[in-house]
Amino acid sequence: MKLKTKKNREYGDDGLLPLVNIIFLLLIFFMIVGVIEKSIVKDDLSLPKVELDKFNNDDTTKIFFDKNKFLYINEEKIDIKDISNKIKSLKSKEIILVADESILINEINTILLELQKNKINKIKLLTSLNAN
């Protein structure tokens, strides 16, 4: 009686198919990750330069806007309606704006618009160094 022997089939891929799958998955992964990072700034924009110096408390005019929405110019409390007249009487063309963190941007914009109307273009916004 003759026993049948199993024929060993030889495959020519040498286990390359899993390697091709892994390379294809890595290629897809890096293509997706490369698309996620986009440029924040357009090419034709020029961002202003900032110098990180310490705040110098000199004779510059300061506008304070506290959490109770009271407005002060150089320690003098004024009404928001009278800001235009007060700004016109200022000698300095440089302003430091100090606003409480609870003040919304549209409230600050009213002050900035009045400053712009009176041709005051040098405005510094005072912030905290350790802001969260």
Image (spheres, rainbow, N blue to C red):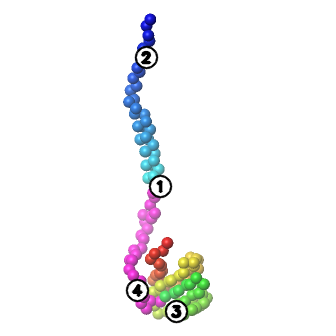
Q: Which quadrant holds the N terminus?
A: top left
Residue for point 44% across, 53% down: 34
Residue annotated with mark 3? 75
Within-10-Å neighbours for mark 1: few <14, some 14–19, many 20+? few
Residue annotated with mark 4? 56
Local SS, label 3: loop
Residue for point 44% across, 38% down: 21
Q: Are marks 2 and 3 in contact (CB under 8 Å)?
A: no
The residue range painted magenta reads 36-61
Residue 62 pos. (x, y %): 49, 88
Q: What amino acid type should be assigned to the residue bearing mark 1?
A: Ile
Quadrant of the image occupied by residue 60: bottom left
Front label number (1 vs 2): 2
In the picture, the disc for residue 6 is: 2
Local SS, label 4: loop
Q: Are marks 4 and 1 in contact (CB under 8 Å)?
A: no
